[in-house]
Amino acid sequence: MEEFFQQLTNGLAVGGIYALIALGYTMVYGVLKLINFAHGDLFTIGSYLGLTLLTSLALTDRLGPGVGILVLALMVMGLVALVGGLLERVAYRPLRHSPRLSAVVSALGASIFFSNTLMLIYGARFQVYPQNILPKTAIDLFGLYIPLVRVLILGTSVVMMVGLYTFIQRTKIGTAIRAAAIDQDAARLMGIDVNRVILMVFLIGPALGGAAGLMVGLHYGQINFTMGWVYGLKAFTAAILGGIGNIPGAMVGGILLGVIEALGAAYLSIAWKDAIAFGVLIFILIVRPTGLLGERVAEKV
Amino acid sequence: MMEKRVLIYGGIAALLAVSPLFLNAYWTDVLNSIGLYAALGLSLNLIVGHAGLFNLGHAAFYAVGAYTAAILNTTWHIPILPLMPLCGVTAGLFALIIARPIIHLRGDYLCIVTIGVGEIVRIALINNVFGITGGANGIFGIARPNLFGWVIRKPHEFFYLIWAFVAVTVFFFHRLENSRFGRALNYLREDETAAEGSGIDTAHYKLMAFVLGAAWAGMVGNLYAAKMSIIAPESFSFWESVVMFTLIILGGSGSIPGVLLGAFLIVGLPEAFRGFTNARMLVFGAAMIAMMIFRTGGILPARPRRYTLPERNLAEESA
């Protein structure tokens, strides 16, 4: 039973990370109907930027671990958002009216470009985060010792997701994003600047992805320039699992996938861990292509 | 105009045919890789270029073919080249089982599922599924191919084997392109609803294109196993699928000369620029984006079909 709860909390923490990345996929897909293959690499950029800023600015020494990490996270999110905005401007906007295949290829190209840029700058080897940043304490929850980091990761991702959800539901820009997701032309007729909405989506999504990258760095300690690929694919699976284009769906899907994967790895086979996630993806697409919370009926063409 | 093109292609083919005479073993081997990718690209071109189905997991079918050949060859010592049709059948059957429930999915969903299938196959191979794939080390000791008593061993010998296969592939897909089947695929790629309305069984044609393309990739897998004599799961990673996909898009999707050119550029150029090993992939990624923005159809885009009207009709009209 102890083992089960450990795996469960581990799955919840990883699921929180998947959910944060999945939000980027789902928002872009919602508005542009494009799978942003480079999103996983934006996540990796986040974790590398986090490492560089952490070691060069020594924020945690100057400001203490709490405030230091917070400032660091804000900087990483801002910078990755900038990269995301640039990506949209350079690689996707000129292709807005081209066939879908072109945008997919452009996205793949961007993904290759980013991961190889990282490799050129940092080298192909694993990079290691400093180990003494977060306290190694475990909290006692009804006799169950759970590492504090897991709780923090899950807590932070839930706060961010709720924040995003409120933003999308309550603010004017959020409403514009929802409108553009439903019908771009109609939104344009209502006076919404769709280009701005799309840019907005490409700022918010990568910012969340960058934050997830930083979390992975702090939690696991090791980062590599290719890791965005696997995380990205799993986050996309999570987005489909919850219903693509649907923001609460991405959260539910991410956390569910994290838990399924952690329990599957513990009780079925660790060697098949990645295959479990893809198996879930295929199963969902065959049985329920709209995902768990997907309201939109998938176009059956 | 027509004759000029035939002349150019003929010239290139002739130059290619004599190239092993003045190239060293290394460059002949590069040409062999290009040949394998050209054949893979042509098989994927049927799925991506003609039927318009996004398939980013083609390496899975290539792997099924290669492993079929390797397992049968090492276990029962069956000569490898006669196994080629069987490799096609296993890869095709596998594609049929995989694609049957998912073929109706919309473009990018299909793309993601094929990526998932590709990854699952690779993980299954690493985990030594059924205890026959040799795990992460793969299978080694595949016997050299033997063509009518002539053992193929050296790079230039493989060159003629591989490029003969490419020639057959070009001929086959050229004929297929201009057949009723090829035209039906192009129709459903352009407008599925209209195709359905004109009596084309779209689900059937899509499935057939997928299975046929996969089966052909399985046969290339056989050649690959024969050439390498060692195969391992890492040779069939997602990256391989991306290479096949991008060489089609860069060269010209739906165009045979385009796919061949794509294979030369994507497999050949990185070899030529080995000096800049690190930066070449970066340039490659940037080139993919630029290509999509400035020349969407690829370098040698597919030419629109031309049909000459029967002369008799013209005469009747003017009379």
Image: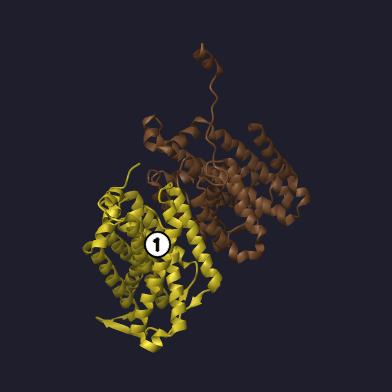
**Amino acid on which the number 1 mark rests in the picture:** Lys
**Number of numbered markers:** 1
Residue A288 vs residue B36: left or right? Answer: left
Assess disc 1: are there few (<14), some (14-19) or many (≥20) residues with their C-alpha within 10 Å of its C-alpha.
many
Residue B164's spot in the image, x, y percent? 67, 42
Taking the spot 41% from the left edge, 71% from the top edge, the residue there is: A79
Q: Nearer the viewer, residue B236 or B199?
A: B199
Colour of the chain lettered A: yellow
* Quadrant position of residue B160: top right
* Quadrant position of residue A180: bottom left
Taking the spot 71% from the left edge, 55% from the top edge, the residue there is: B27
Q: Disc 1 marks which residue?
A: A234
Tell me if residue B41 can be seen.
Answer: yes
Q: What is the residue that sits farthest to the top in this orientation?
A: B319
Q: Nearer the viewer, residue A206 or B179?
A: A206
Residue A124 vs residue A152: left or right? Answer: right
- Which chain did the renderer colour brown? B
Residue A170 vs residue A301: left or right? Answer: left
Tell me if residue A272 can be seen.
Answer: no
Q: Nearer the viewer, residue B16 or A290?
A: B16
